[in-house]
Image (cartoon, rainbow, N blue to C red):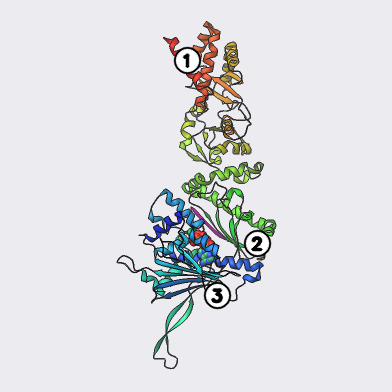
Amino acid sequence: MAKKQFKTESKRLLDLMINSIYTNKEIFLRELISNASDALDKRHYLSLTDSKYASSSALSIYLDINKDERTISIEDNGIGMSKEDLENNLGTIAHSGSENFKTQLDESDEVDIIGQFGVGFYSAFMVAQKIVVETKQVDHDAYKWVSEGQDGYSISNSSKESVGTKITLYLREDSKDVKYSDYLDSFQIETLVKKYSDYIRYPIQMMVEKTIAKEDNQEEYETIKELKTLNSMVPLWRRNKKDISQEDYNNFYKTKFYDWEEPLKVIHYSLEGNLSYRALLFIPGKVPYDYYSKDFQPGLQLYSKGVFILDHGKELLPDYFGFVKGLVDTDDISLNISREILQQDSQLQTLKKSISKKIKSTLVDMLVKERKEYEKFFKNFGNSIKYGIYQDFGVNKDELKDLLLFYSSHEDKYVSLKEYCDRMKPDQKDIFYCAGSSIEQIKKQPQIEKLLDEGYEVLYFTEEIDEFSVMMMRDYEGHSFKSAQQADSIVETEEEKKEKEELEKANESLLANMATALSGKVEEVKISTRLKNNPVCLVAKEGISMEMEKYLAQLPTEQQAKANKVLEINPNHEIFKVLQKIYKKDSKKVADYADLLYQQALLIEGFSLEDPVAFSNKICELIKEAN
Ligand code: ADP
């Protein structure tokens, strides 16, 4: 029988398992039991619509220890595997859990991360020198998969008669560091099942020895064997909250949702009413590696009376809370439902609404009471909330607006819109923001200099979605959003305004000349009241902002949408005085300077120059003239 080789990535993981010095080797049992439980779920699910999958014996997991052979086996009467499944599932690195592990491995070669999350089937090689998998599916032949690790695996026919999978581990010899024979001790195994797999919905059974008084002579004792169910089978989410430790939740989350990091927040609650349900939800501690790819499957698991019905139920979560993982268990939804019907089910709509409400209230609560945690959450998933506001023409904006945080000039930290409005200056009506590529870059923007100087708070928008989402919101509690880079967002006193108008009149022809020189580039050249130390700045008129222009330019569409720009000049800056002088001497010369100032403003704004060579030549010309 020819040996087949493991696929490269699997090999790497395998090597790691085999050579693992990881002390927490015991998690292999949890992994194999959770696979068995999944297989039972799958069979149960198929049996709902097709009786050939029904099992004559109760769905269960059976553990068996053989001290002479040094084996421990884990057997289930679940879905089983076909020959292809064996090849695909055990020959190559499996999906979810192991795949996650692989990506993590690429980032760090720390052995420590093993066991912090589901590493799946391969973890068995931490304790076994040889693994035999015998398996059979309904209407299929039975097969046997054997592997001693690195040198590959082989698949052959098996005489297994019952449907399901039996995995036999041939334990390694004890070494001075590790006593593998501990796993041959039924008490040890029982303890491990209690520790990691207590909530598994199916009975996990094992023959255990028990000493009892003899029937005929109560003075004497005998040891008998009896089948014992080791787990309580009450799913974690059906247990009383006060009996569940944070560690229980964390362990459950990590194995069930294939994460190696602890969840940031656990939301466990039950609701009684027209539609009663329990939910156990988790906000991940970090962004899933595939979160922004199309492979990411949002949604919650759905259980009815503790029985698994559906994975990734997208119907149960709005898109903007797509990062939430977890499950919902309700007695009020009928079991025999197909996915199609599920989608229309009005009960599901009610569930979705109720779950969203709970998630939102939890987040609001976090924002108030656990600020640091909330900021961590928002850095990870804030963009989902912002997209939620923008999506569907803003129907959810009122629902989500209070979850927003923006980085603010006020004490250099994240603030909510409510906090911003609560401390607005008495004369302030608008919420000011400035958009740019980074906080550092925004801080240097000429347009916010005076605003900050006069004590106005400015929100720094560093994400592309930021402006789009506030544009969709229009205002927050009656306060409009105004970009500091917007032509009409000036805060000026009546005097300043009057002074500006006078200056514009007095310099009418200079400004007009500059505007002509910059025609096609800016719409107007104006005197500014928003500048302090900078000579010029660009602002945009209503419509597309400059940040949006940059964003749109990256899109692979032909359409080029540009902001209608205005070049503003600081009348108190020396440069302006110089311009006036030059204009008096030689009015034509002003065109060159106007262009230079415009291009400088573009650079400050983070645009690239259309013709950097011409720009630098022009500077050289001027330097030469200075001579
Ligand atoms: P994961 O559970 O993360 O997908 P594993 O390496 O643990 O990865 O398992 C790989 C795959 O092998 C599973 O997804 C499942 O399809 C299959 N499998 C493992 N154990 C069993 C079992 N007891 N019964 C049926 N299929 C199984």
Which comes before the other along the chain, label 1 or label 3?
3
At label 2, the amino acid type is: Leu
- Picture disc at residue 574: 1
Residue drawn at (44%, 51%), measured in percent from left and top? 104
User: Where 593 sits versus 354, above or below?
Assistant: above
CA separation in Å, label 2 and label 1: 72 Å
In the picture of the structure, the residue carrying the numbered disc 2 is: 275
Rendered residue at 57%/70% (across/down): 141
Q: Does 265 appear in magenta?
A: yes
The mark that comes first in sequence, 2 or 3, is 3
Looking at numbered disc 3 in the image, what kind of residue is underneath it? Glu
Instruction: Specify whether residue 197 is in view.
Output: yes
Specify the label residue 161 is tagged with: 3
Q: Nearer the viewer, residue 271 or 249?
A: 249
Across and down, in percent, residue 25 comes to 39, 63
Which residues lie in the magenta part? 262-269
Looking at the picture, which amino acid does disc 1 mark?
Glu
**Furthest-bottom residue in view?**
216
Q: Is residue 383 above or below residue 202?
A: above
Label 1 SS: helix
In contact (CB < 8 Å): disc 2 and disc 3: no
Q: Secondary structure at mark 2?
A: loop
Q: Earlier in the sequence, mark 2 or mark 1?
A: 2
Asked if residue 322 is among those painted magenta in the image, a careful observer would answer: no
Could you say where residue 61 lies in the image, as x and y percent from the top left? 51, 71
Q: Residues within 10 Å of mark 1 (few under 14, many from 20)?
A: few
Front position in the image: 208 or 184? 184
Q: Nearer the viewer, mark 1 or mark 3?
A: 3
Question: In the rendered view of the protein, which quadrant contains the C terminus?
Answer: top left
x, y percent for residue 38 = 54, 64
Q: Nearer the viewer, mark 2 or mark 3?
A: 3
